[in-house]
Amino acid sequence: MLFISSLEITTEKAKELMTRARNPEMIQGVVIKDILGVFGKPDIILIFEAPSERTAAEFVLQFTDCAITRTHLVFPIKIIEGI
């Protein structure tokens, strides 16, 4: 399953958030596809694979004391018939 998480810094912990995003605590089954910085809000986008929504949530929880996180299950549009 493919997920995208946006991280918006909420405290003075910007440096800590950037460090965690570059070197996150890995949860078994999670594979990071890309980490993107954003000019503006959100501050960071994480694209990752996880075997389930629960595993994705466990992975994203490590950022919640530094950022507002929004995580979405995403999919390639080409797999939808008729599009």
Image (cartoon, rainbow, N blue to C red):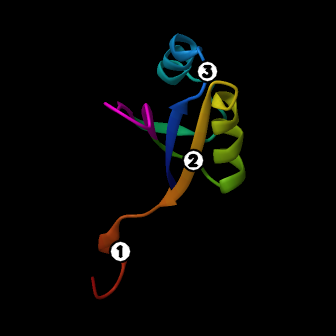
Q: Position of residue 14 (x, y in %)?
A: 52, 16
Q: Is residue 9 visible?
A: yes
Q: Residues within 10 Å of mark 2 (few under 14, many from 20)?
A: some
Q: Which callout, 3 or 1, points at the residue further toward the start of the chain?
A: 3
Q: Residue at x 61, y 21 (%)?
A: 11
Q: Is residue 29 magenta?
A: no
The answer to which quarter of the image holds residue 83 is: bottom left
Which residue carries the number 2 mark? 70
Magenta-highlighted residues: 35-46
The CA span between labels 3 and 2 is: 16 Å
Q: Position of residue 69 (x, y in %)?
A: 59, 40
Tell me if 6 is positioned left or right of 69 in this view.
Answer: left
Q: Position of residue 25 (x, y in %)?
A: 63, 23
Check if mark 1's residue and mark 2's residue have beta carbons within 8 Å.
no
Residue toward you, 51 or 15: 15
Which three-letter amino acid code belongs to the residue tagged 2?
A: Arg
Check if mark 3's residue and mark 1's residue have beta carbons within 8 Å.
no
- 3 vs 46: above or below: below
Which residue carries the number 1 mark? 79
Query: Which one is in front in this view, the residue at disc 1 or the one at disc 2?
Result: 2
Check if mark 3's residue and mark 2's residue have beta carbons within 8 Å.
no
The CA span between labels 3 and 1 is: 39 Å
Tell me if 34 is positioned left or right of 23 in this view.
Answer: left
Q: Residue at x 66, y 55 (%)?
A: 53
Which residue carries the number 3 mark? 11
Label disc, if present, on residue 1 of the rendered structure: none
Q: Residues within 10 Å of mark 3 (few under 14, many from 20)?
A: few
Tell me if 24 is positioned left or right of 4 in this view.
Answer: right
Q: Residue at x 65, y 55 (%)?
A: 52
Q: Residue at x 56, y 49 (%)?
A: 71
**Outermost residue, bottom side:** 82
Which three-letter amino acid code belongs to the residue tagged 1?
A: Ile
